[in-house]
């Protein structure tokens, strides 16, 4: 059974259809990437999975359980952690409090401390700035905090929405290295990216979206050599 | 000099009561961006619950406060769920008009003979008044009670907001409720809690007001409510220390104006200050400009 399976969902913003019969799956332990141009519906998919938007038809199953009608905060409690586009840091709170918010659904003080320590081990800069207001962090540090905050929830699946946005190329490389590291430690990841090259280099499988519908899917390595993908998303003019 | 210091003390007395009301305005605004105009009337209900607890049941002072706190909390949670929640995604103006409607409803409904009644009722002193004369400055034990109860409430609030899980959730929701939901926070529960917490403080304020200015009426919440709202805006709406600061400034200014100018300008000065602050710093003294989220 797939950890996450999205079956024929249609999502509307008022009367504008944003997703058209979208189906895809994410297996436990995988990194699955959704790539596509601006406005293709990538973020909408993540919003639907995390319960911010409800699909008008179709189903979203998490470990076989239908998420239809489940309120947003319960979906988070069931193990879906979204790192939203623009990071969604609580800039009015300290770094430490942001991490505590990530652990909101957990109760054991001891285990929360352990998870926070793991995040600090992964991102030593965050430890140094633990009592600093999160709004004072740099863009890269905020992205680390957003990912760290998702990790302390001990989620079944992490949804990353454009994590590379606004980061320097060097930081982007570090970030993707880190995404792989987190995945190897056992976390399932659904990654939405405009940076298709990076996304395909880190993902196991990927789906290509165009104007709200999935037009192509397959192993990331196959897609990387697909001439159509190369021409459209990897800037391969010769392709 | 004694006269001036005496006025400072009198100003603190009313300023502390305003602070307890202003906190409810500012916290609710911080969470749902709504000016809850019914808040002053929740304060009035607190005063009446205090009146009944003292006069009819002769409860000890602690029980008087607790009953007002419990009554106001329940009332505010009900108001939020019945009147504001259905309008949460409606245009702001709809909630605002509803808040005014709830305010009028509470004032007129409670002034029915079958409820509290339309008259002014005297609030009996729950303890004998003691006056201390310190170098010509009069301090009463009522002022001491107001001071200690308010400081206790402020410390407790500080603890709740900064040291508890619920307080952290409140701060998160006030910053970005969608992201707070992504953390597994039940935003509705946090909103109810905030309304309840603000109302609890207003309930304490109502009892203190009744003790200090021993006359209550179902329309008594209007002016203190308006001034506490002004205090919250003055300090920077949404900002907790700002509400306290604004309330203390408000208390001092109106006391000083009635002492040195004329008590006729007592209620006017609040709004003069408000206008000046809005011209000079529209976000209030401690407020920070924030971009509205879309």
Image (cartoon, rainbow, N blue to C red):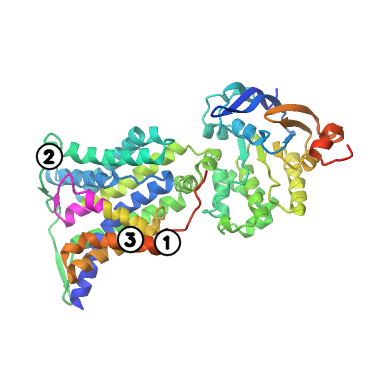
* Coordinates of residue B29 in the picture (x, y in percent): 39, 48
Q: How many marks?
A: 3
- Residue under label 1, please give it: B286
Is residue A51 a member of the stretch shown in magenta?
Answer: no
Q: Which residues are magenta?
A: B208-225
Q: CA distance from mark 2 to mark 1?
A: 41 Å
At a point 23% along the width and 64% down the height, the residue shown is B254
User: Can you give x and y, in whole percent of width and height, for residue A222 in the image?
Assistant: 85, 31
Of mark 2 and mark 1, the one earlier in the sequence is 2
Q: To which quarter of the image does residue B49 belong? A: top left
Q: Pinpoint the chain carrying mark 2.
A: B
In this picture, is B38 found above or below A135?
Answer: above
Image mark 3: chain: B
Can see residue A226?
Answer: no
Q: Is residue B277 above or below residue B46?
A: below
Q: Residue furthest right?
A: A238
Labels 3 and 1 touching (C-beta < 8 A): no
Q: Is residue B214 magenta?
A: yes
| N-terminal label among 3 and 1 | 3
Which element is circle 1 on? loop
Q: Describe residue B182's horizontal placement relative to residue B262 as left or right.
A: right
Residue B148 place in picture, x, y as percent: 28, 60
Q: Quadrant of the N terminus of chain B?
A: bottom left
Instruction: Please name whichever residue, B256 or A132, is drawn nearer the observer in this view of the structure.
Output: B256
Which residue is tagged 3? B275
> Subunit of mark 1?
B
Can you say whether B33 is above or below A211 in the image?
A: below
Residue A81 drawn at (x, y percent): 61, 38
Q: Mark 3: few, some, or many residues within 10 Å (few <14, many ≥20)?
A: some
Disc 2 marks which residue? B117
Residue drawn 61% across and 31% down?
A49
Left or right of A34 on screen, residue B146? left
């Amino acid at each position: 059974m797939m950890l996450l399976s999205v079956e024929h969902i249609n999502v509307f913003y008022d009367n504008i259809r944003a997703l058209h019969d979208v189906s895809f799956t994410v297996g436990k332990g995988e990194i699955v990437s959704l790539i596509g141009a601006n406005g293709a519906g990538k973020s909408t998919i993540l919003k639907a999975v995390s319960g911010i938007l409800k699909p008008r038809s179709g189903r979203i199953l998490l470990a076989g359980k239908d998420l239809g009608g489940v309120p947003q905060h319960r979906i988070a409690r069931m193990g879906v952690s979204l790192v939203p586009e623009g990071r969604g840091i609580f800039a009015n709170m300290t770094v430490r409090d942001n991490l505590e918010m990530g652990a909101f659904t957990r109760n054991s003080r001891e285990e929360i401390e352990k998870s926070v320590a793991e995040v600090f081990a992964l991102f030593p800069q965050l430890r140094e700035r633990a009592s600093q207001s999160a709004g004072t962090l740099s863009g890269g540090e905020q992205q680390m905090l957003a990912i760290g905050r998702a990790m302390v929830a001990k989620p079944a699946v992490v949804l990353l929405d454009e994590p590379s946005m606004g980061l320097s190329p060097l930081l982007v490389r570090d970030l993707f290295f880190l995404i792989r590291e987190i995945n190897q430690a056992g976390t399932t990841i659904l990654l939405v990216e405009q940076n298709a090259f990076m996304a395909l280099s880190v993902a196991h499988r990927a789906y290509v979206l165009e104007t709200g519908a999935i037009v192509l899917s397959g192993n990331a390595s196959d897609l990387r050599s697909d001439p159509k993908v190369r021409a459209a998303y990897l800037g391969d003019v010769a392709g | 000099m004694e006269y001036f210091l005496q006025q400072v003390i009198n100003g603190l007395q009313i300023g502390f009561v305003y602070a307890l009301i202003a906190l409810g305005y500012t916290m609710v605004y911080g969470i749902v961006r709504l000016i809850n105009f019914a808040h002053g009337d929740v304060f009035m209900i607190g005063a009446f619950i205090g009146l009944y607890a003292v006069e009819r049941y002769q409860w000890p002072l602690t029980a008087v406060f607790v009953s007002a706190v419990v009554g106001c909390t329940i009332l505010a949670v009900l108001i939020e769920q019945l009147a504001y929640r259905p309008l949460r995604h409606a245009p702001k103006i709809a909630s605002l008009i509803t808040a005014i409607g709830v305010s009028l409803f509470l004032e007129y409904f409670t002034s029915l003979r079958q409820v509290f009644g339309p008259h002014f009722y005297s609030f009996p002193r729950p303890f004998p008044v003691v006056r201390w004369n310190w170098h010509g400055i009069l301090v009463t034990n009522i002022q001491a009670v107001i001071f200690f109860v308010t400081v206790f409430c402020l410390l407790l609030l500080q603890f709740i907001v900064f040291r508890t899980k619920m307080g952290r959730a409140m701060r998160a929701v006030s910053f970005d409720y969608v992201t707070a939901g992504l953390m597994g926070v039940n935003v509705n529960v946090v909103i109810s809690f905030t309304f309840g917490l603000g109302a609890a403080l207003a309930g304490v304020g109502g009892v203190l007001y009744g003790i200090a200015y021993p006359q209550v009426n179902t329309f008594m919440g209007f002016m203190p409510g308006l001034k506490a709202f002004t205090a919250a805006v003055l300090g920077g709406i949404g900002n907790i220390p700002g509400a306290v600061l604004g309330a203390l400034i408000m208390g001092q200014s109106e006391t000083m104006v009635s002492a040195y100018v004329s008590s006729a300008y007592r209620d006017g000065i609040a709004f003069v200050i408000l206008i000046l602050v809005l011209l000079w710093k529209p976000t209030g003294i401690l407020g920070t400009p924030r971009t509205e989220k879309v």
